[in-house]
Image: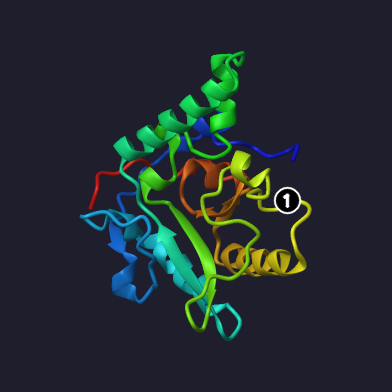
Amino acid sequence: MSGIVLMSDRRVAAIALQECGENLVDVRVHGVRADDRRHDEAGAYAHVRQGVLTRLLHARSLLPTGVQLLFIEGYRPLALQRRYFEEYSGRLARAHPDWQAAELREAAGRFVSPPEIAPHSAGAAVDVTLIDHAGRELDMGTRVNADPEESNGACYTDAPGLSTRARTNRATLKAVLSAAGLVNYPTEWWHWSFGDRYWALQTRQPAACYGPVEPP
């Protein structure tokens, strides 16, 4: 998987931020089907920036008949993002006691973004999958949020060794979300974003338009 730019790469953090001030909106109000596995009492998980929602709705309209988007998680408060990053870094440190701090940060960035540049905490990212007409999740090769250790790297979007069905379903997801203007984080097939620093780097924009934002 050489050539992948990780969230922990200093080139991502170096991207300028020109916050546009766009509001967070609840995708459920706009007819997006949201799973409740990341549900929180305030419903923050179901919020994204308006520009992200617009693109998500466009992507949904491009799906073939009988296939639907299932929204898993959008906005994530900064404190929660920090907790996820520290917990995963701790797991890696225990598994690899010889790794230096820089190695741990890089490895953690495969699966959890460093808090200071996290797309989810900017309301810029969505975790999504596909379902059929009966609401059953399609075969994507791994579960949503499977880490690299658990999945033996199969969580990477273009991982080798996937079944034909999983490759086809990932290709469908990739086609509609890319066409709508979102970019994928290549270590997580389910993670797509717009307007954040990672998006800006991948699309060669001079600055991100969405930075960390307060909960809705």
Question: As shown in the figure, which amino acid type bears the numbered disc 1?
Answer: Ala
Examine the rendering and report whether any part of residue 115 can be seen. yes
Vertical order, 80 against 45 (above or below): above
Estimate the x, y position of residue 107 in percent, counting from the top left.
Answer: 59, 29
Give 39 or 204, whichever is nearer the viewer: 39
Q: Quadrant of residue 169?
A: bottom right
Q: Residue at x 49, y 54 (%)?
A: 194
Residue extending furthest bottom? 65
Vertical order, 56 against 107 (above or below): below
Q: How was this image coloured? A: rainbow
Estimate the x, y position of residue 202 in percent, counting from the top left.
Answer: 61, 45
Q: To which residue does mark 1 refer?
A: 159
In this rendering, would 37 be left or right of 188? left
Q: Residue at x 33, y 74 (%)?
A: 30
Vertical order, 93 against 189 (above or below): above
Q: Residue at x 38, y 67 (%)?
A: 34
Examine the rendering and report whether any part of residue 210 can be seen. no
Give 65 or 183, whichever is nearer the viewer: 65
Q: Within 10 angstroms of label 1, few (less than 14), some, or many (20 or more) residues?
A: some
Estimate the x, y position of residue 91 in percent, counting from the top left.
Answer: 50, 28
